Amino acid sequence: MQITIDDKSGFCFGVVNAIRISEEELGKDNIACLGDIVHNSREVDRLKEQGLKIINHDELPEWTGKKVLIRAHGEPPATYHAAKQLNVEIVDATCPIVLKLQDRIKKSYFEMNELNGQVVIYGKEGHAEVIALMGQTRGTAILVTGVKDIDKIDFSLPVRLYSQTTKDPAKYAEIGELIFTRMRNINGINADFKQFNTICGQMAGRSPNLQAFAKAHKVIIFVGGDKSSNAVALFSVCKTTNPSSYFVSDASGLQQEWFLGVNEVGISGATSTPTWLMEEVAEAIKNMTQD
């Protein structure tokens, strides 16, 4: 059995940075992370074994005088304010790309207040990054999860459109075009619409790379966390390109019948999937298919 791990898969820069910071801090003192540091339970478990505590917002008061890590997804301003009031020391591992996006949305929030306009965010409802982005507008931004939601927008008013950094570029472009068309139908050439390219370049490049990888292999095993929206989106790319694609969280999800009559397999993963986990799955496939 020939097994190939996709060298363009695995952790993105933001996740690598957050994990590096957490491991550095764990070497000094106890630290908690506000929410799962990455949407992959196996990697979270690995860091827990090193001493990382995972807490929710209600548990923040228990960390007065101690350190709490902000993960790569970021947090809304209210979290920083609460931490300051509680004398909790924040170790900020927010992805720099997400931080830049937060700042841009905040500036648009003030601009739209002046123009009686709207900030619109394309993203997944309840996702940690989206909660942080909405917080930059004090919760007033309009969240669009898909085409079905664009009727929430008042097309007669100015619009500034942003996307969660890990969304599909093609779907974001489609939503932007639909909004702009509706605005032009009402306002003509005076339609005040701006759409910003805020999808992470690393993420945007994953889909075409993954399509090529999926085409090049008879069977694809995609390794990802159940909580990861990025994993779901990227697996969809695999499945559409190659119907013989299967999603597993770890080696325990593998099924022997997937490999009957197959002599080569490709393994890929999400931006939240560690390389060591893909290697573990590769080893399990090798053992499972040995004569």
Image (cartoon, helix red, strand yellow):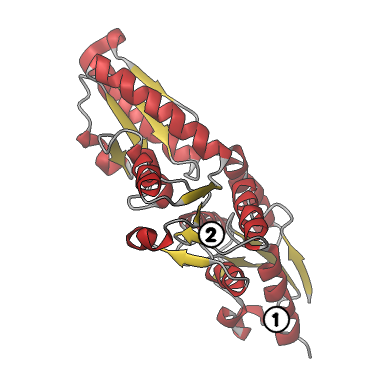
Residue 247 sits in which quadrant? Answer: bottom right
Q: Nearer the viewer, residue 212 or 120?
A: 120
Q: Is residue 13 above or below residue 251?
A: above
Residue at coordinates 78% horizontally, 77% vertically from top-left? 1
Mark 2 = which residue?
Answer: 38
Tell me residue 47's x, y (percent). Answer: 60, 68
N-terminal label among 1 and 2? 2
Label 1 and label 2: CA atoms lie apart by 23 Å
Amino acid bearing label 1:
Ala
What element does badge 2 sit on? loop
Q: Is residue 74 above or below residue 65?
A: above
Residue 60 sits in which quadrant? Answer: bottom left
Tell me residue 17's x, y (percent). Answer: 64, 49
What element does badge 1 sit on? helix
Give the number of the mark in front: 1 or 2.
Answer: 2
Q: Is residue 14 left or right of residue 35?
A: right
Q: Is residue 180 visible in the rendered structure shown here?
A: no
Say which mark, if any, is on residue 284: 1
Residue at coordinates 70% horizontally, 63% vertically from top-left? 275
Amino acid bearing label 2:
Val
Say which mark, if any, is on residue 24: none
Q: Is residue 31 left or right of residue 142?
A: right
Q: Nearer the viewer, residue 37 or 149?
A: 37
Q: Is residue 191 visible in the rendered structure shown here?
A: yes
Q: Is residue 252 left or right of residue 9?
A: left
Asked if marks 1 and 2 touch (Cβ < 8 Å), the reply is no
Q: Is residue 156 left or right of residue 268?
A: left
Q: Residues within 10 Å of mark 1 (few under 14, many from 20)?
A: some
Q: Is residue 40 above or below residue 241?
A: below
